[in-house]
Amino acid sequence: MYSSFRSTSEVEQLPPTVYVQGTSKQPTDTADQKEMQPMTLQHDLPPAYPSIAQDIAEHFLNPMNAGIMCIVVWLLLLAGTAMIVVFALFWWYGVFIGLACAFVAFFLMNGFVTNQPNNGRVYMLCGKYYGTLIKAGYFWMNPLISTHRSFSLKATTLENNKLKVNDVLGNPIEIGVIVVWRIVNTAKAAFSVNNSSQYLSTVADSAIRNVARQFPYDVSDEGEEMSLRGSSVQISLQLQKEIQERVEIAGIEVLEARISQLSYAHEIAAAMLQRQQAVAVVAARQKIVEGAVGMVHMALAQIEDEGKIVFTPDRKAQMVANLLVVLCGGRDAQPTLNVGEG
């Protein structure tokens, strides 16, 4: 009897099994080793998944005026009532005809719709997009369609809360934005996003963070680059463009986007306020000194032109110093009387 089990040494001496194009064999010679190929696994891949965000073309409905259908419904109700009351006494089949007329009338009554101005209604039929109603008035439509969502086409404002971000210099700032928007494509707004306002708010937060990191809070000493505080028009245009690119999929048009609140963060607000005050004081002093020097020069030139008083260099320097002290001083000058040398 032979055993089906092999020892470890026998197993180690066996040649390895090689998979070649889905079949296995034992290499016996050099020719077989040349024909050996690396093992390849082939899977039946499923077809590509369809795009989740399908681009649904919006088309507008032109429904029938409700006046004609109102007459038809009233005639059906009258005919059904008459058949039930009159023919029930003589011909019992008339009752079924009258009930059928009443049923049709009540079914047609489900098609009456009222749409307000600047309002869009998205309708569906059997799970598919049927059309959008934007005309204002009282209409009759197919009773089998259903209202999926209703949108206001008016311009709406969205004001986000303050966000804490760092500008291009790394200074923490708090910034808020106001976005004026409206829906221009109801099909995209209904089937691409769940909530248009919430989607726009999230996109606006991301856009304002991205824009705030590209510019400093205020201009530097040279004053040549753009800043969040000094270049409000350019920043608003860039912010509007960035938001519009991201909300195009939701059928939203951004009419305007502006920074509503801008300030340094609380941890550096006091230090930055002192810096701004110091810069303002220095700029004011520069203007005062420029004006004082011009006034002193004009006064000395006028006195010398008249020739009534001749100053020595020492007296002229003393007069210039006194005038500059009076003109550049932060407080009113206190006059002193020289009574002569003691």
Image (tube, helix red, strand yellow):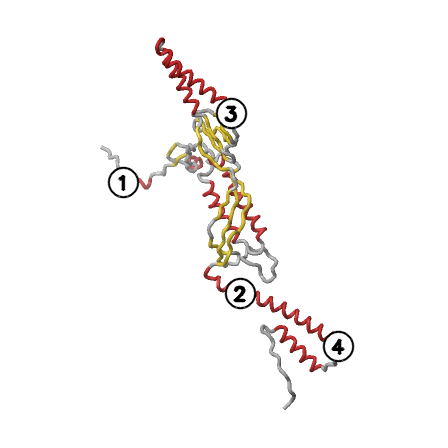
Residue at image mark 1: 7
User: Dividing the image into 4 quarters, which one contains the N terminus?
Assistant: top left
Q: Could you tell which of marks 4 and 2 lies nearer the N-terminus?
A: 2
Total labels: the figure holds 4
* Mark 4 residue type: Glu
What distance separates the C-alpha of mark 1 from that of mark 3? 93 Å
Disc 4 crowd rating (10 Å Cα; few below 14, some 14-19, many 20+) is few
Tell me the tag on residue 260.
none
Q: Which residue is drawn at 54% across and 41% down?
A: 253
Coordinates of residue 207 in the picture (x, y in percent):
51, 48
What distance separates the C-alpha of mark 3 from that of mark 2? 69 Å
Relative to residue 327, is residue 34 depicted above or below? above
Residue at image mark 2: 275
Q: Could you tell which of marks 1 and 4 lies nearer the N-terminus?
A: 1
Relative to residue 293, is residue 18 depicted above or below? above
Disc 3 crowd rating (10 Å Cα; few below 14, some 14-19, many 20+) is some
Closer to us: 337 or 162? 337
Closer to us: 175 or 74? 74
In front: mark 4 or mark 2?
4
* Mark 2 residue type: Arg
What distance separates the C-alpha of mark 2 from that of mark 1? 87 Å
**From where the camera sits, is residue 205 visible?**
no
In front: mark 2 or mark 1?
2
Disc 2 crowd rating (10 Å Cα; few below 14, some 14-19, many 20+) is few
User: Dividing the image into 4 quarters, which one contains the C terminus?
Assistant: bottom right
Coordinates of residue 213 in the picture (x, y in percent):
52, 54
Q: Is mark 3 on a helix, strand or loop?
A: strand
* Mark 3 residue type: Asn
Tell me the tag on residue 304.
4
Residue at image mark 3: 65
In front: mark 1 or mark 4?
4
Q: Could you tell which of marks 3 and 2 lies nearer the N-terminus?
A: 3
